[in-house]
Image (cartoon, rainbow, N blue to C red):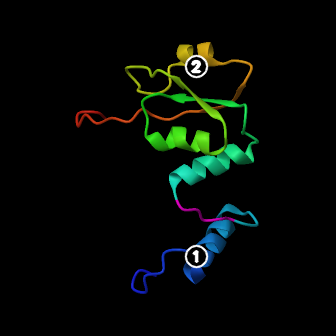
Amino acid sequence: MFSRGRFILGEEVAAVEAEFARCLGVGHVVGIASGTQALAFALSSLGNGLGDEVITVSMTFAATAIAVECVGARPVFVDIDAETRCMDPSALEAAIGPATAAILPARASCFNTSCP
């Protein structure tokens, strides 16, 4: 694959998809381009779209919010717990409203090299 410069579609991707499907015991697996696309596909497959709100953390990679917007939903940002850098449960509870369709947890990005 690398020596031929074939990174998109083609026989190699089909082979990886087939092998991964076999390992998972499912009929099909579809390779996609990025983590952003993976998040958007997941949200879309669960029916999230226009008028929906998706709760996620405010301190994360931009792709998290971009994926929410890709399906037409609106990201609702909540703060993180300072110790775990994961979504603060009390902030999450306060953010849940009638338009909440999903919660997209993500560990906060950290640019400090001392972060675990």
Give residue 22's position: percent from left, percent from top.
68, 69
Relative depth, front residue between 36 and 112: 36
Reading the image, the residue beneath label 2 is 92
| Disc 2 crowd, CA 10 A, few/some/many (<14, 14-19, 20+) | some
Find residue 27 and report its image quarter: bottom right
- Closest to the camera, between mark 1 and mark 2, is 1
Of the residues shown, which amino acid type is indicated by label 1?
Leu
Label 1 and label 2: CA atoms lie apart by 39 Å
Q: Position of residue 20 (x, y in %)?
A: 62, 67
Q: In terms of secondary structure, where does tag 2 sit?
A: helix
The residue lying at 76 percent from left, 42 percent from top is 47
User: What residue sits 43% from the left and 82% below the top?
Assistant: 5
Q: Amino acid at mark 2?
A: Leu
Quickly name the residue at label 1.
Answer: 9
> What stretch of residues is rendered in magenta?
29-33
- Observer-nearest residue: 21 or 31? 31
Which element type, helix, strand or loop, lies under badge 1? Answer: loop
Q: Residues within 10 Å of mark 1 (few under 14, many from 20)?
A: few
| Predominant secondary structure, magenta span | loop
Q: Residue furthest left?
A: 113
Indicate left or right for 49 with 78 as reference: right
| 110 lies above or below 35 | above
